[in-house]
Image (cartoon, rainbow, N blue to C red):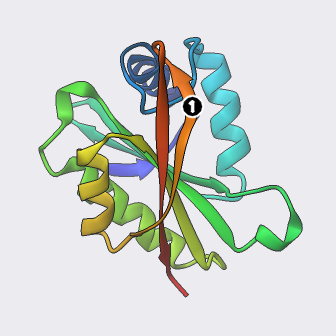
Amino acid sequence: MIHTVKPEDASNIATIYNHYIKHSITTFEEQTITAQEMQHSIAMASENYPWFVFETDGELAGYAYASPWKSRCSYRFSAETTIYLSSDHHRKGIGFELYSHLLEALKKTPCHSLIAAIALPNEASIALHEKLAFEKVGHFKEVGWKFGKWIDVGYWEQLIH
């Protein structure tokens, strides 16, 4: 079941995100976050952009949201999209369903350009984005440093209006 994020989802979302902070290059965060910090992030992003969670069997399996691409006024029709799944819910079709729901919601907004930043390598995320009609538009070499190594970031984009 997909629903709009609620404040009480913050703890479960923080748990999912903290797994990626500790074990993955997917995020460049290095310090885990609290449920209160996540609740603040949710409140800030969901004021103007959609934020959804996917629940299955009473468990939060993942979340997806959009946020401003950049703060300058001329970027107001561009949004960055993000998705994270619980490590127990990969390769079950949840990511496709949840992200598709987010994209449909964004089509009802003034957003024109959707941008996804993917730390590389990440074949699963690339496959998901390309399955959903995102196209690779950029590649930055060695822009992140985590776990003692340099990390590249690719950018995928989809124009929706």
Residue plotted at (39% across, 70% down): 134
Q: Nearer the viewer, residue 73 or 142?
A: 142
Q: Does 91 sit left or right of 54 as displayed? A: left
- Identify the residue at the far left of this view: 92
Residue plotted at (72% across, 52% down): 47
Is residue 50 visible in this depiction of the protein? Answer: no
Is residue 110 visible in this depiction of the protein? Answer: yes
Residue 44 in the image: state x and y as whole percent: 73, 42
Kindly indicate the quadrant of the structure image that contains residue 34: top right
Which amino acid type is marked by label 1?
Answer: Gly
* Total count of labels: 1
Kindly indicate the quadrant of the structure image that contains residue 91: top left
- Identify the residue at the far right of this view: 73
- Residue at the spot of label 1: 144
Residue 112 in the image: state x and y as whole percent: 61, 79
Q: Nearer the viewer, residue 97 or 77?
A: 77
Residue plotted at (48% across, 13% down): 148
Q: Is 156 situated above or below 117?
A: below
Query: Element under label 1?
Result: strand
Image quarter of the C terminus: bottom right
